Image (cartoon, grey):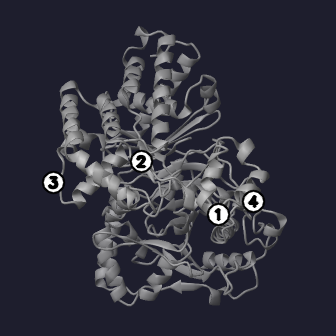
Amino acid sequence: MGPLVGRLRLGSRPPPLWPLGGSCGRRRLAAQAGPEALAGREYLQRSVVPTLHFQPSLPRLPIPKLEDTMKRYLSAQRPLLDDSQYRRTEQLCRTFENGLGKELHAQLVAQDKQNKHTSYISGPWFDMYLSARDSIVLNFNPFMSFNPDPKPDYNDQLTRATNLTMSAMRFMKTLRAGLLEPEVFHLNPAKSDTDTFRRVIRLVPSALAWYGAYMVNAYPLDMSQYFRLFNSTRLPKPGRDELFTNEKEKHLLVLKNGNFYVFDVLDRDGNILKAADVHAHLKYILSDNSPTPEFPLAYLTTENRDTWAGLRQELLSNGNKEALGKVDSAMFCLCLDDFSITDLVHLSHTMLHGDGVNRWFDKSFNLIVAKNGDAAINFEHSWGDGVAVLRFFNEVFKDSTQTPAITPQAQPALVDSSRAVQKLDFRLNETLKAGITRAKEKFDSTMQTLTIDSIQFQRGGKEFLKRHKLSPDAVAQLSFQMAFLRQYGQTVATYESCSTAAFKHGRTETIRPASVFTKKCSEAFVREPSQNTADQLKEMVTQCSKYHSQLTKEAAMGQGFDRHLFALRYLAAAEGHKLPELYQDPAYGQINHNILSTSTLTSPAVNIGGFAPVVPDGFGVGYGVHDDWIGCNVSSYSARDVREFLRCVNKALGDIFDVLEGKPVRS
């Protein structure tokens, strides 16, 4: 099973989760949309198998054995510590394993047996997200940008915004009607991705359906997070935020120049509004030349969560309850920017954070469309992981480009949009105006410290590496280890996340790419390439690949160490225990200070994706290994040099490819 990859700083910054794209066996278990489904354009597809058919029978996320967790933890610590540090950490692990850790583990297992409806990590993980008080901008929300529509004239802002909105609504309707294909990982598509299998498996009771799929090497994935895609918002509350969803509401929220508009996208019977009507309403909003408000409300969603919670209460007390309710319960937020994207760096900055005026970062997702039609999704992370977001993203791209709701020549409906579209007004007192001013100052100063840049390595990609029997992901990760060693002379904590969505209410587990193998290999390439033959260097790369593949497989099966240690620490706090010494060890703090935070994303729908570093002195490394090239989109704050890091990544990949081709490594 391929990894679904993201990042984390334990206890503070939960990971954006990127599912690994490509063929990867992940075809879908359902019939394609038939003519009868497309006729009304209400649905994307009519799955033979109900969307949540497998949900009741999904296997439960296993809790690893404590001794295995300790071994894996020490293996990950080995390349980061000197001998004396390692011996101390080893002793702390032994003490924990035979003492309080043993007691906590037994409690965790007992607790898990009493809560068979969920996973042992789900509650603590939600709690970690929602209790974090940092701004969600940069610290949490990542972005994924769509490739342009293959038909150039369809990239007009109004045309594209209309088509993306209509496709998003079709996805919503299909999901809620139970007609969306279940998310399934197929290891043998010839057996499981067939009409015959669909007809059989839909007759198997839901309580047993997973076992039927398993018999033909198909693995249904957890879809419990999908319902939060629509009509959902993260509400700021003192100490701990809340997730809010109201599926009864029928309206869309649109932002333009920091102004708020709403209009119904479903009629009173729950049918999607005609495309010509949506077209007309969006044209009306785009033609509104209202200036940006003097005090743009959206800045408040970029604030510290406790600060924002206090200001939200002030908003409610100042007569804004109805307007805020419209924002919170909207289907999603469509952001219409009034400028064109100039290049990939501009695209990344715009879609990751923008200017703070034209986004409502608390919504489950913002669908952003620039003036030239460049589009992206920026999503709030507490409600779920990237499995649901990427599925939505891929389906919307496919539907909006292959069966668009309108053409560039289409005429908007002759409707009175001035009556259908409501512009929201917010009453602001001096406290709120001062709060918005402070939020803007803080936002602007933070964004000035963020640098983003990217490279494309064109000598080869997935196909070349697989011919050499190497894991493409392992090679990409090795290049980051080599690059950091070349630039800074050390091996540091590195994070790569793997989805555990194959289990009920699974979240993520961590792959730890920095290993004794990558350290040895990096040092050989960077410090002493002339002392090793090409064959010796190639053998080291192969060892790295094998170990990385083992770590990936373990993580996908819920057999990493990070989530287990996190759950034990969470339980210790809940039970009132003093923080165990293991967690007070500087080595524990260091391995969870993830200087290299990495996340892979490849999909035919995705142009580029990105996120900020999870620590002030870190890199946020978004990357994709494509068939014949490797892309890397990296962010950092002022403590690190992105451009030099990318130069070193390019050099590392070049050195690895030289060795695989039997050439000497160039100095």
Q: How far apart are marks 2 and 4 (CA)?
A: 37 Å
The circle drawn on residue 153 is 4
Mark 2, residue position = 7
Pick whichever of labels 1 and 4 is earlier in the sequence: 1
- Indicate which label's residue lies in the foreground, 4 or 3: 3
Q: Where's residue 15, x and y in %?
A: 42, 52
- Indicate which label's residue lies in the foreground, 2 or 4: 2
Taking the spot 18% from the left edge, 51% from the top edge, the residue there is 579
Q: Can residue 291 be seen in this view?
A: no
Three-letter code, disc 3: Lys
Snapshot quadrant of residue 69: top left
- Indicate which label's residue lies in the foreground, 3 or 2: 3
Q: Which residue lies furthest to the right in this view?
A: 35
- The N terminus appears in which quarter of the rendering? top right
375 vs 649, left or right, is: right
* Foreground of the two, 639 or 78: 78
Evaluate if marks 1 and 4 touch, with contact meaning CB atoms under 8 Å apart.
no
Q: Where's residue 158, x and y in %?
A: 67, 69
Pick whichever of labels 2 and 4 is earlier in the sequence: 2
- Indicate which label's residue lies in the foreground, 1 or 4: 1
Three-letter code, disc 4: Asp
Label 3 SS: loop
Label 2 SS: loop
Mark 1, residue position = 51
Q: How far apart are marks 1 and 2 (CA)?
A: 29 Å
Pick whichever of labels 3 and 2 is earlier in the sequence: 2
Mark 3, residue position = 578
347 vs 485, left or right, is: right
Three-letter code, disc 2: Arg
Label 4 SS: helix
Pick whichever of labels 1 and 3 is earlier in the sequence: 1
